[in-house]
Image: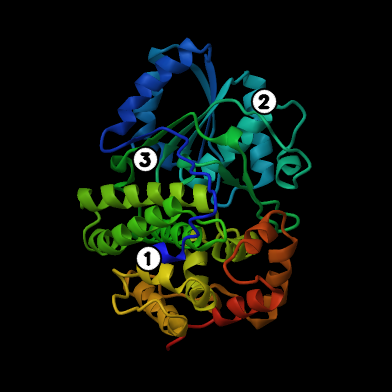
C-alpha cells in the first residue's frame, strides 16, 4: 500500500554507511577492532560512558581486555547523564585532549554515543566547543574515529550521522547531522541489553518506532526509509509484548535490537519531523524526562495531524497494530486513538500532564520548538505544514488521553 505514496521520478540518496557487528557475542569483535585501530596508529583513546551501564552490562570487561592486549591506553569520562549537556561534552573533550586521545569510544545508549560523537569533532578541530557545534557556529568536516558500543535497542545512533546535546542555559536541545560522525565501528550485542529495566526496555523500543514513523513520512522519505520503517514497527509490535512478559527472552531481545538498527537506518535516510522536533523542548525543559516517554506521549496527536497526508503509508506501517485501516484520510482520529491504545497496552500510560506539564507551558514549548537550532528544519520536512498553530495543537492534545 505504501508504494503508491512514492514519487518514482524523484531521485533519492540511499545511505547505508556504517558497518555494524550485530548478534549475541558481537562484543567479542572488539578484539578485531582494537587490532585494526592499532595498525592505524591509534594507541590512545577516550572512553565516554555513563557511570554504571558500561560495567554492569558486561561490556567493559571484554573491551578493557582487548585494549590492554593491543597496547591501547585509555582514559574514561564516565559522567554522561541522560540528555547530555554541552558542559559534559566540553569536560569530556578536555580530558581527551589532555590525554592525547586519537579516537573516541562511546559505550551506552544514545546519550554516551552522541556525546562521544561530539567529542570526536572537538578532538579533530582545535579550539571548538560543544556550544560552537550545537549553536551551528562551526560546521565540522572532520572528526577522529568513533567506536560505538550500543547498550540499548532504541537509539539508532550507532548506525547514523546524528547526535543530540542539550544547551542548559537556553533549554535548547539541537540535533546535528554530519558525515564525519558516522561511527567507524559499531557493536550491537543483545547480550549487553538483557538487564535493561522494564521501563527502559519500553521507552527505547518506542524511540525506534518513532524514528521509523517519522522517517517514512517526511517530504524526503525514500523506499528504503519506508520499507525499513515498516519492518521495524512490525518487529516491535511482535516482540515488545514478549519481552515485557519475559525479560530473559533472548529471541525477543535480538529482534528488538534489529528493529532499532532498522529504525536508525530509516531515519538516516528519511530524517525526522514533528515527534522528535516537539520532544526535544520537553526534555530540554525537564532533562530527567525519558526521551522515549516524551515521544510516546505526543505520538498519537502527531499521527492525527499527519495521517491525512500519508494515509496509505501509515496504514501500511500500522498493519500489524491496527489491521483494519484502509489508508484513507478520514481515519486520522481513529488511527490516533488506536495508537494510543497500543502504547497503553505495551506499558506507556502517561501523558504530558502526568509529567508536570500544563496549558500554561504550551506557549513556551511552542517557542522552544521554533527557536531551538535545527528543529525548524525538521518541521519543514513534515508531511503537513508545520505552523505554530499545528505545533500548539499537538502539545495541547497531548496533555491528556484521547479516551479516559
Q: Which mark lies nearer to you, 1 or 3?
A: 1
Left/right placement of residue 123 relative to residue 3 reads right
Q: Which mark is residue 317?
A: 1
| Circle on res. 56 | 3
Position of residue 350 relative to residue 253, above or below, is below
Which of 131/64 is in front?
A: 131
Q: Earlier in the sequence, mark 2 or mark 3?
A: 3
What percent of the width, then of the height, locates residue 312?
A: 41, 71
In-image side of 367 versus 276 (left or right): right
Residue 4 visible, this angle: yes
User: In which quadrant of the rendered view does residue 129 lie?
Assistant: top right
Q: CA distance from mark 2 to mark 3?
A: 31 Å
Task: Choose the circle earlier in sequence order: 1 or 3.
Answer: 3
Q: x, y percentage for residue 354?
A: 51, 77
The reply to whether callout 2 and callout 3 are in contact (CB within 8 Å) is no
Q: Secondary structure at mark 1?
A: helix
Image quadrant occupied by the C terminus? bottom left
Seen from the viewer's position, the closer of residues 9 and 356 is 9
Where residue 158 sits in the image (x, y, percent)? 46, 40
Kindly identify which residue carries mark 2: 124
- Which image quarter holds the N terminus? bottom left
Calculate the distance from the C-alpha at mark 1 to the C-alpha at mark 3.
36 Å
Question: Residue 230, how many percent across, how many down?
Answer: 36, 59
Amino acid at each position: 500500500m505504501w508504494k503508491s505514496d512514492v514519487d518514482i521520478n524523484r531521485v533519492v540518496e540511499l545511505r547505508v554507511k556504517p558497518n555494524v557487528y550485530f548478534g549475541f557475542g558481537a562484543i567479542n569483535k572488539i578484539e578485531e577492532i582494537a587490532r585494526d585501530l592499532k595498525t592505524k596508529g591509534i594507541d590512545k583513546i577516550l572512553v565516554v560512558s555513563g557511570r554504571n551501564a558500561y560495567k554492569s552490562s558486561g561490556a567493559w570487561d571484554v573491551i578493557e581486555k582487548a585494549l590492554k592486549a593491543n597496547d591501547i591506553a585509555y582514559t574514561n569520562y564516565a559522567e554522561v547523564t541522560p540528555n547530555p549537556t554541552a558542559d559534559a561534552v566540553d569536560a569530556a573533550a578536555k580530558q581527551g585532549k589532555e590525554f592525547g586521545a586519537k579516537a573516541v569510544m562511546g559505550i551506552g545508549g544514545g546519550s554516551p554515543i552522541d556525546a562521544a560523537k561530539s567529542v570526536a569533532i572537538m578532538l579533530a578541530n582545535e579550539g571548538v566547543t560543544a556550544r560552537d557545534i550545537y549553536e551551528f557556529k562551526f560546521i565540522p568536516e572532520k572528526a577522529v574515529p568513533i567506536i560505538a558500543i550500543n547498550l540499548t535497542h532504541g537509539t539508532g545512533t550507532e548506525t547514523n550521522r546524528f547526535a543530540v546535546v542539550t544547551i542548559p542555559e537556553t533549554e535548547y536541545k539541537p540535533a546535528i547531522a554530519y558525515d564525519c560522525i558516522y561511527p567507524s565501528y559499531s557493536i550491537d550485542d543483545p547480550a549487553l541489553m538483557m538487564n535493561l529495566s522494564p521501563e527502559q526496555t519500553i521507552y527505547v523500543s518506542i524511540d525506534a518506532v518513532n524514528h521509523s514513523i517519522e522517517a517514512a513520512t517526511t517530504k524526503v522519505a525514500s523506499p528504503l526509509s519506508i520499507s525499513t520503517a515498516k519492518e521495524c514497527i512490525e518487529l516491535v509490535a511482535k516482540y515488545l509484548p514478549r519481552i515485557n512478559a519475559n525479560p530473559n527472552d533472548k529471541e525477543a531481545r535480538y529482534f528488538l535490537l534489529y528493529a532499532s538498527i532498522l529504525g536508525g537506518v530509516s531515519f538516516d535516510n528519511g530524517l525526522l519531523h514533528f515527534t522528535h522536533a516537539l520532544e526535544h523542548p520537553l526534555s530540554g525543559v525537564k532533562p530527567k524526562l525519558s526521551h522515549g516517554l516524551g515521544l510516546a506521549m505526543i505520538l498519537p496527536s502527531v499521527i492525527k495531524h499527519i495521517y491525512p497526508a500519508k494515509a496509505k503509508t501509515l496504514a501500511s506501517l500500522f498493519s500489524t497494530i491496527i489491521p483494519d485501516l484502509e489508508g484513507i484520510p478520514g481515519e486520522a482520529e481513529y488511527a490516533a486513538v488506536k495508537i494510543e491504545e497500543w502504547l497503553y497496552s505495551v506499558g506507556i500510560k502517561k501523558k504530558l500532564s502526568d509529567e508536570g506539564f500544563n496549558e500554561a507551558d504550551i506557549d513556551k514549548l511552542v517557542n522552544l520548538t521554533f527557536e531551538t537550532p535545527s528543529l525548524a528544519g525538521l518541521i519543514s520536512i513534515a508531511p503537513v505544514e508545520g505552523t505554530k498553530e499545528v505545533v500548539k495543537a499537538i502539545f495541547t492534545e497531548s496533555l491528556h488521553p484521547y479516551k479516559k
